[in-house]
Image (cartoon, helix red, strand yellow):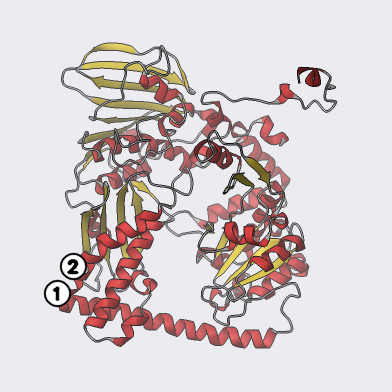
Amino acid sequence: MSDLFANQPASSSGYDASTIEVLEGLEPVRRRPGMYIGGTDERALHHLASEVLDNSMDEAVAGHATRIEVTLEPGNRLTITDNGRGIPVDLHPKFPGKSALEVILTTLHSGGKFTDKAYATSGGLHGVGISVVNALSIVTVVEVALNKQLYRQSFSQGLPTSGLEKVGAAPNRRGTSVTFIPDSEIFGEQKFKPARLYRLARSKAYLFAGVEIRWKCAPDLITDDTPPEAVFQFPGGLADHLKEQVGDRECATSQFFSGNQDFPETAGRVEWAVAWPLWSDGSYSWYCNTIPTPDGGTHEAGLRAALVKGIRAFADLVGQKKGKDITADDIMTSSEIMLSVFVRDPQFQSQTKDRLTSPEAARLVENAVRDHFDHFLTDNMERGKALLGYVLDRMDERLKRKQEKEVKRKTATSARKLRLPGKLTDCSTDDPEGTEIFLVEGDSAGGSAKQARDRKTQAILPLRGKILNVASANTAKILANQEIADMILALGCGTRKDCNPDNLRYDRIVIMTDADVDGAHIATLLMTFFFQEMTELVRRGHLYLAQPPLYRIVAGGKSLYAKDDAHREELLAKEFKGKKVEVSRFKGLGEMNPGQLRETTMDPKTRSLIRITLPDDYEDRQQVRDLVDRLMGNNPAHRFAFIQENAAAVDEEAIDA
């Protein structure tokens, strides 16, 4: 075997063993921060604060900490301190000469949350949070008060700059203090926003009634009405939060539906608070182990099931036959909902934990909430009837809109039957509710998608390559483009000032491109088109991105799919450890057989979609429009300036790739 390798000629392309890099320690985090914190923007910067604060919250939830302090100082210096048990400082048995503290701060996937020995439930799961913060900070200082002694160690960019020092006696102190300054090489000139940190600290206090959180900020850093000092402690938990959020708005029931319940079968609990304002829009707030999950997930599904089953049962109890047609949307649309669960070993859709995917959460939440909701409705029959009347009104409005849409769709379909795009393979149902149109890249992928689809509810429109960049084209050129014309005709809702989402022929528009660079480029062009030409569709949440896998991993009879390189490595380490595997890479959607495409990307039961939207309370649309113009417009100088401004976050290897 050695002779075989000895006779191999040197690669003329320069691609040989010496070009293969092995990143060690925390270097992968600095090379690809987006994999760990979702990017390098303002949201990602504040995610660092969340990671450290979540560790302190885990100590509080576990019953070991009662107080947390969040302090922002000049120089973008943030300190988070708790009075919990303190990070262990004794030597780690698997890392000779290193303390457990140093291992935790400098090693990915290290921590005390992989089993339930130290924490029954926790927000940190992968052992990457505090080490990622360390890797992306120019200065990190950790102090631990343990056994009446104070210890300290300093780090920079993930590496120790001092050994573990025994500072002296600390008879009246215990717990952990983490001070860090985010690295400007990663985040540029971005600074922590006091208002955002203030809201973060405040929301955490609502999520666990037993903790006191103290907020302090240097006054000269504040540019709005954020107080420089505050103390948060809310004995009523989410109910206090909801009461403050609803304010003096009139609701369908004067008393909110709120409560909490421990799970009987396993460690964990659920807390909820729901109100039904009469004349205003509502909002949803979902949490798991004190971590916000803005995209909801299985705990949301459990609450939906409990509410709809409960209100239907109450309708049957009082003899209201219409109650059998009530849906979850009828009782949840326009409501103010806050839901917080604590579960062991939760599963999330990504490292940033935007969506909970733990299957058992749905059942646990439904069972826990359902009994309380039944009691809420029947304990005061007048209150129950008032809520039922409110929900039936919402149901009547929904059915009326549905009927109007059915008439519009049938009329539009009949009138344009011969004018629909030739490549469009339409769905069979006349009702747009629940239907989807998949915009796919090329005829090959389109053919596979047509075989994989649900013919009743899923339509397929293949597009030829990269569509026109609408941000750098005039109106005449846009309308003359065949691919864009086909999309406009298929969707049926018009563009720009004539765009009316009520005329949209489908409930969801799903962009489904290959999981590679070209596919990402096509998806970007399509998102630019919808943002500019059909903005209201995006704002109302009709636009989605499919998430096809890049790899298929097989070992014996077990087969799993990975969406990217990082996910592949995670599956190899967790699901296929020590096994001989076969890894195949999909070059495009057209290479997947219909069964694989259906299972991974198109079947609502097994797929994951990313919703693209522009909520009013999240970002100013004009700022987004300006950014789209800079990056996608016809002035290359704007793109060049943006690249220069953000060059620190992109290494040469990424550019070459």
**Dot placed on the residue nearer the N-terminal end, 2 or 1:** 2
Cα–Cα gap, marks 2 and 1: 11 Å
Question: What residue is rendered at 24% in x and 46% in y?
Answer: 208
User: How many residues crowd mark 1 within 10 Å: few (<14), some (14–19), many (20+)?
Assistant: few
Question: What residue is rendered at 47% in x and 29% in y?
Answer: 108
SS for tag 1?
loop
Tell me the tag on residue 255: 2
Residue 371 against residue 516 in the figure, above or below: below
638, 383: nearer the viewer = 383
170, 599: nearer the viewer = 599
Give the image quarter of residue 142. top left
* Viewer-nearest of discs 2 and 1: 1
Tell me where residue 55 appears, x and y as whole percent: 33, 35
Give the image quarter of residue 178. top left
Question: What residue is rendered at 40% in x and 40% in y?
Answer: 193
Residue 448 against residue 154 in the figure, above or below: below
In this rendering, position of residue 613 left or right of residue 300 = right
75, 53: nearer the viewer = 53
Dot 2 and dot 1 residues touching (CB under 8 Å): yes
Tell me where residue 372 appears, x and y as whole percent: 21, 64
Tell me the tag on residue 380: 1
Asked whether the viewer can see residue 271, the reply is yes
